[in-house]
Image: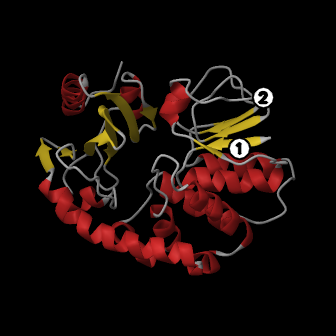
């Protein structure tokens, strides 16, 4: 039996609960949603897919993204919810198969994945261990898989204070704090505001810089949504577009997950992403910005 999940905090925590409850006898398969959608991942009978689009070859499926909603639900648990990990936890807790209390871990995973953050948590994530830890999880095409697996082990077996004292975690957390500080200047230099939408375009950069993705809402408090555009790090023929609803300012009427599903992506009502051919990006991005600027519910 194998876990197939996404390399983000929600995926890591989902794996924690699946290891606690199932007889997992193969390494975790870490993949991105677009890899499932394009059929580029081998999914086998016995696989448990979590925090990803559904693949009919899997045995169990857990997800919470609005763009992945189906009329006929397969075995597992799907519901629009703050996190997929919370659904995995609920599913096995109801079956009486969880012997440990992970309520605190679920609460913070919900906060992080649903972006239920306040201004202080965005500006000073180093004061909030779970938030800072989540920022150390970055997808570099599988290069960090050993670290993601290490986090699954740590969170299964240790309280958060001990997790944060782990040497690998400490080094990465220190790096994240420095990256967040530098990211503010980079973000400002490459962002324009169009109406009440901020547009950050990193395609001019040879090196993609990491940083707190919610900083944009502190820098531009009046925007109702942000759009970020960048090239795929390994393939400049592929452009990645990410959209987020402001976590501080209400008013966006467009369902982002549904909008991006038109371009082969998806996500939540308030956040999502998609990958497209760079040759198609100018037209597609113009369309996306027009729809966001119009700010009417999608039909």
| Residue 45 numbered tag | 2
Q: Which residue is mark 1?
A: 3
| Residue 173 at x, y percent in the picture | 45, 73
Under tag 1, what secondary structure?
Answer: strand
Residue 81 is left or right of residue 210, and the answer is right
Q: How many marks?
A: 2
Residue shown at 47% from the left, 64% from the top: 136
Confirm whether residue 255 shows in the render.
Answer: no
| Res. 126 image quadrant | bottom left
Quarter placement of the N terminus: top right
Q: Earlier in the sequence, mark 2 or mark 1?
A: 1
Please name whichever residue, 206 or 183, is drawn nearer the observer in this view of the structure. Answer: 206
Confirm whether residue 130 shows in the render.
Answer: yes
Q: Is residue 161 placed above or below 59 in the rendered structure?
A: below
| Res. 274 image quadrant | top left
| Residue 85 at x, y percent in the picture | 64, 50
Residue shown at 46% from the left, 55% from the top: 138
| Residue 135 at x, y percent in the picture | 45, 62
Q: Is residue 247 placed above or below 263 in the rendered structure?
A: below
| Residue 16 numbered tag | none
Characterize the local packing of mark 1: few (<14), some (14-19) or many (20 or more) Cα atoms within 10 angstroms.
many
| Residue 206 at x, y percent in the picture | 22, 49
| Res. 54 image quadrant | top right
User: What's the coloring here?
Assistant: secondary structure
């Amino acid at each position: 039996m194998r876990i197939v999940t996404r390399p983000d905090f929600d995926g890591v925590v989902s794996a924690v609960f699946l290891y606690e409850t199932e007889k997992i006898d193969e390494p975790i398969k870490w993949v991105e949603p677009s890899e499932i959608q394009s059929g580029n991942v081998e999914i086998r009978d016995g696989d448990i897919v979590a925090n990803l689009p559904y693949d009919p070859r899997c045995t169990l499926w857990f997800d919470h993204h609005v763009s992945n909603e189906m009329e006929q639900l397969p075995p597992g648990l799907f519901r629009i919810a703050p996190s997929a990990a919370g659904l995995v936890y609920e599913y096995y807790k109801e079956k009486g198969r969880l012997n440990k209390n992970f309520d605190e871990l679920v609460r913070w995973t919900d906060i992080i994945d649903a972006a239920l953050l306040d201004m202080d948590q965005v500006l000073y994530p180093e004061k909030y261990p779970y938030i800072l830890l989540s920022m150390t999880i970055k997808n570099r095409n599988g290069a960090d898989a050993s670290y993601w697996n290490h986090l699954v082990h740590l969170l299964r077996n240790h309280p958060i204070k001990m997790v944060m004292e782990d040497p690998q975690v400490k080094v990465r957390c220190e790096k994240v704090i420095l990256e967040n500080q530098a990211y503010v200047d980079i973000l400002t230099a490459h962002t324009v505001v169009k109406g009440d939408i901020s547009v950050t375009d990193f395609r001019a950069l040879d090196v993609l810089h990491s940083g707190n993705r919610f900083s944009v809402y502190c820098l531009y408090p009046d925007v109702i949504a942000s759009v970020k555009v960048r090239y795929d790090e390994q393939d400049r023929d592929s452009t990645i577009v990410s959209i987020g609803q402001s976590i501080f300012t209400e008013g966006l009427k467009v369902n982002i997950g549904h909008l991006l599903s038109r371009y082969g992506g998806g996500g939540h009502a308030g956040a999502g992403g998609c990958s497209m051919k760079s040759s198609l990006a100018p037209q597609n991005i113009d369309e996306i910005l027009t729809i966001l600027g119009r700010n009417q519910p999608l039909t």
